[in-house]
Amino acid sequence: MKFKKIKIFGLVSLLVTAILMLAVFGFSCVSGLAAVGWSGGVVANNTLYVGSMEGRLVSVNLNDQSILRAEPLKVQSQGGLFGCSSALSCGGGTSRVPIYGTPVVSDNVVYVAGYNGKIFAYNALNFAEKWEYPSVGAGYLQPFVGGMVIDNNKLYIGCANSYVYCLDANTGGLLGSYQTGDKVWGTPVVVDGSLYIGSFDKTLYALNADDMTLKWKYTTEGSIIAPPLVKDGIVYAGSFDKNLYALDAATGTLKWKFEANNWFWSQPVIVNNMLYAGNLDGNIYCLNPATGATIKIFGKDDLAVISPFVSQPAAVDNYIIFASQVGIVYRIDSTTQEIEPLATLTGTITGPLTVYNGIIYFQTQDAAIQRVDYKFIDEGKDPLLSSISLVSG
Amino acid sequence: MNIWELIIQQPLTNVLIVISHAFAGNFGAAIILLTIVVNLVLLPLTLNQIKSSKKMMELQPKLAELQKKYAKDRQKLSQETMALYKTSGVKPAGCMLTMIIQMPVWFALYQSIMLSLAAVPEGLLNLSRYLYPWPIVFASIPINPYFLGMDLSSPNAILGVLVGVFMWVQQKMSTMPTADPQQSSQNSMMLWMMPLLFTFMSLTFPAGLALYWVVNSLFRIALQYRITGWGTLFKKAAKPTEPEKKYLEFKQPEEKRTTIVDKDGQVIITDKDSLKKSQKKGFFDRFKLGGGDNNPPDQNK
């Protein structure tokens, strides 16, 4: 009888294991189910600040690539089953706060926003907390996915609860807000007193940065996540309707639009009066910023592998540095329109690129900061420098 | 993109998005409709599976007898078991095969649901790889995850509990009473383990998946009801035999023959009731096994 019971238990255990394995197999086929984060880095005083994939704000000394400090973002009181709420990622038995937006440094204060719906301000040297918004005990907002911008001692950020917030950068006090029609995952841009930001409601908003009132808005056919680029009175914004729009910065009237094959996820750049925009279709489009006319398309004939361009590109000297999601870093010479691969990495790249003293910094999905010297290739050296691991312990 | 993604996951994901667009962006309605459609497509296989399972369960008393009779001769037991399967028209592998065929379809369906929901930023980014270049698809993204006040992209306790309840009902309906204590305890363990396991998964994953499981269970309950009635849902399970008690052998009365086959192979109906029934036969009745109550005879005291 005892043997039979053991046999039954064994059979049921086997079945449960089989179901769990099948479930794990099934879910593993769907990537992108867990929030991980893709924060970029910002450099101030020769120190790189980045939100790590482990949910920590990390400062790195760029002289010797050593980790100076690492502060985990505060985890909210646990909501969901086993303490896993939608705003947290649970892995390895611990909860962490995914960080998507790149931190911002201003006046020796580093600001970072978490997917848990909280904005933190720390002393840039010792990471002592200055303030947090919403303040302690005031709960949490919806996830922050986009980055923030500081202008005139005011912090601007969009939230998944559809609001764009304006906070006092010194105190974290709320100065104003503007509600859009849906989630805001984009990073705002402030130019000449105007704030530009896209929303899931398919609209690009131009707000008066002073009082957060609407200046104008322009509705497209798709959601807008990519941060807009403002240059010479024109706002360039990519949309999920596959179009890149050029709008008059003062009035919001359409100047031109250019259609690609997939979403525009990242901000375009303008170098030498040429606009470069990466697209999730795996092409880089070089356009005339005044007319939208195609100058060149960097596609399958020019690129080693066709892979989406998710990361924010970086401009340095006459070059534009792009990183494809599959891990290839390219350099485009804007004077000759030549493209060449600088480095091929094993980890995927989704976070923005940062340039400092001729070196490109970005975080890969294996939680490491990669360093690429864009000039080394001209000297016959390997542009890929040693990486900096952000993994704790 | 691999072959699986190209021929299964991508089309299903785009269909789901288009249906959602047709329902004015109501993703919950799209999940319900697609789950029903997929269930209808797989109906012949599902019915076959239920039929096979039922036959297998009906054979349990006879199998138990064989096990008792040939307890010391494994080879003979195996031969007799196979012979019993053959004479009863049961294909044990057929039941499993049907389940195996269905499994990829269910995986594809729930993968598409998870993909379309794009609950986290990485999910939305991943979704872009699967979209057809149709304006209707691009205009529908991101999907509105709200359905009847529930956020389908986050775990939902109500749907989680419903998954467990409906799965339990479905399990209970499909479990046949058995006098074999081993089979009985196996059944009762399965009756609770499966719903608990799926409830746990529903409380962990986005509610869109739970909605799919709820609709799926409801469909299966309706199907099971149509074929076997409420089964053992409202009946007490047969008591297992106790070794210290004495039992009288109960011989099942010979079934009244309602048809005969003549020498030309023609089936002749011999009583009026059967004739009436045969004239009213519908699609589902083809899968019915015998009368309304098909429970195997208990071993009466």
Image (tube, coloured by chain):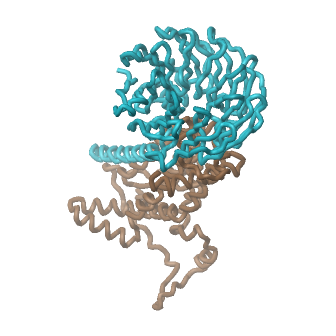
Chain colours: A cyan, B brown
Where residue A157 appears, as percent x and y from the top left, is 64, 22
Where residue A305 appears, as percent x and y from the top left, is 45, 46
User: Is residue B143 visible in this depiction of the protein?
Assistant: no
Q: Is residue A43 above or below residue B288?
A: above
Left or right of residue A162: residue B214: left
Residue sitting at the far left: B72
Q: How many marks?
A: 0
Where residue A386 appears, as percent x and y from the top left, is 35, 27
User: Residue at position x 60%, y 22% from top?
Assistant: A148
Q: Nearer the viewer, residue A336 or B119?
A: A336
User: Residue at position x 53%, y 56% from top?
Assistant: B231
Left or right of residue A40: residue A295: right
Q: Is residue A141 above or below residue A381?
A: above
Q: Nearer the viewer, residue A317 or A44?
A: A317
Left or right of residue B135: residue B203: left
User: Is residue B182 visible in this depiction of the protein?
Assistant: yes
Where residue A231 appears, as percent x and y from the top left, is 66, 29
Quadrant holding the C terminus of chain A = top left
